[in-house]
Amino acid sequence: MLTNLSIRNLAIASELDLEFDSGMTALSGETGAGKSIILDALGLALGDRSSADIVRHGSTRAEVTAVFDLRRLGNALHWLQERELEQDSECIIRRTVTREGRSRSYINGQVVPLQDLREFSAMLMDIHSQHEHQALLRRENQQQWVDDFGRYPTLLKKVKEAFIKWQTMAQRLEQLQSQSSETEARIQLLEYQVDELDKLNLQARELEELEAEQYKLANAEAILATLQQTSQGMLESDGGCIEQVRQCIHQLDGLQISLAPIDNARSLLEEAAIQLEESNTELRLASDKIELDPERLQEVEGRLGTIYDLARKHRINPDQLPHRHRELAAELASLTATDNNVEALTALTNEQFAVYSEAAGALTASRKKACSELEKAIQKQLTALGMHPTLVVESKPLQQPSATGLEELEMLISMNPGQPPKALRKIASGGELSRISLAIQVITAASSQTPTLVFDEVDVGIGGPTAQIVGRLLRELGGKTQILCVTHLPQVASQGNQHFFVSKLVQNGSTQSKIHLLQDQDRVHEIARMLGGVDITEHSLAHAHEMLASSQLQ
């Protein structure tokens, strides 16, 4: 709810600071005193368009600051948290307008776009007046009131979710159908390529092993010749390495002298002889493993040829074939999956539309019942307010399904018997609209999410007993949501839980608008003024006392 409103240099108000309580707040004052300044300030806070004309003469800028308590507004707190604008359970909205007409908006000290301010403030306050903030004339609001009154949020959510899911599928299906020929050609190519690579079935390290084997088989004769030459010609024949080392050892043995360097040299020669003999053994083993196998060579070269051919076809290195295989297989799986298959997706889209249609049909039935009950309730309330129109809620089928159902709802009214009902904006006057709005809000307040409602002169064109009823209805509504009401009638003002008086005065040649909270005798005098005009009599004072006392007993 609104807790504070600060106004600086707006129109004829240089400095105003107001604190609001819950319940009903009445604002009264003489004509031209500046009651509209409060509405203008609230309008700015809600995101109304601004202009340089609203800046007080001689000032550089106008500023409005509104403070809201959000403890019971989970949706508003969530909105702030999503944008990292939260500040405990309190929210401060500030709007400035320069004398050049430039405007800036702030939420909890951070600059925000005007559109964001409008979106957020719609969760906080609704102004019912004869101006552009009049929500009653907007068809979407009328439909929202019916849905709030009907109390079927789960069904509304189900319809919206089913619609979004169906639309997503339908859009994907349309995209696939427009690309079907290209997609089919791509699928055929991928199937051929993946099949080739499936048949190749190249294993990890297989290419490396094949190339090593191919080299060994292709060069088997030369390898064997080299091994045999090394083993026989250098190690085993007369004069070979082993024989020469052994002769050296024999010559050292013939010296018959013991010197450390000679002993070390002999030891090293013996180790060398052993190493040479082991090398010879390894060469013989290697020779045993080298085979002349033309058939295997042909088989290996054929396998390698297939691998190299596929690599050239895909324009990659042979060792990249396994990665390409995985890529192509994944793309093929994606294109042939259900959500990329026209026939399969068509079936799923039809199934989802059936789900949506069932939910939307249930919503239509619930709305029909809610419309009938709401019509009766509003009609009863309007009769109590001294109005006898015929009000109906018309349901028009939409040409296309929507996230809000299969129909749009609009309130139609006939102010005179025998005349067909027409849209509210075409029939009702400003005062009538205020009372119609009041009747609707009284009925739907229990389910409304708007914490603060502002009524501008809902008493236009009424008086007597009807004015008393309007006052009681506003006070009753104030028990469920915060009410701010600009009024000229004492029957309405006396019902307020608090009462502000708006006045203006001239100081130093400058007009100033003033607002102060009325208490005790001041309030009695204001109610008496509203009853009898400028001349306040004992009779009007007594009547004012009686009206205030009566309102406090309700």
Image (tube, grey):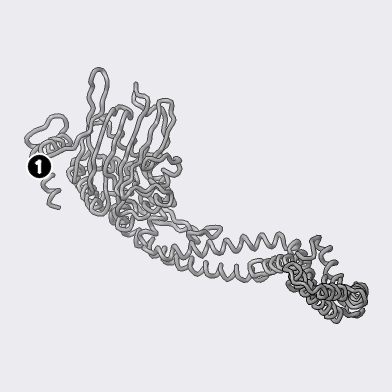
How many numbered marks appear?
A: 1
Q: Nearer the viewer, residue 530 or 303?
A: 303
Is label 1 in a helix, a strand or a loop?
helix
On screen, residue 187 versus residue 393, left or right, reads right
Residue 552 is situated, as x and y percent measured from the top left of the image, at 13, 49
Q: Is residue 301 visible?
A: no
Q: Is residue 68 above or below residue 99?
A: below
Residue 121 lies in what quarter of the image? top left
Which residue, given by chain and number where applicable, does mark 1 sit on? 545
Residue 547 is situated, as x and y percent measured from the top left of the image, at 13, 44
Q: Is residue 79 visible?
A: yes
Q: Is residue 445 above or below residue 286?
A: above
On screen, residue 6 versus residue 170, left or right, reads left
Question: Which residue is the extreme one toward the front?
Answer: 257
Q: Nearer the viewer, residue 391 or 110?
A: 110
Q: Amino acid at mark 1?
A: His
Picture residue at 10% right of the left edge, 44% below the top: 546
Residue 542 lies in what quarter of the image? top left
Q: Nearer the viewer, residue 247 or 342?
A: 247
Residue 140 is situated, as x and y percent measured from the top left of the image, at 44, 52
Picture residue at 80% right of the left edge, 78% below the top: 278
Residue 108 is situated, as x and y percent measured from the top left of the image, at 36, 42
Question: Which residue is the extreme one toward the top?
Answer: 509
Q: Answer few, some or many: residues within 10 Å of disc 1's Cα (few below 14, many 20 plus, some between 14 and 19).
A: some
Q: Nearer the viewer, residue 530 or 5?
A: 5
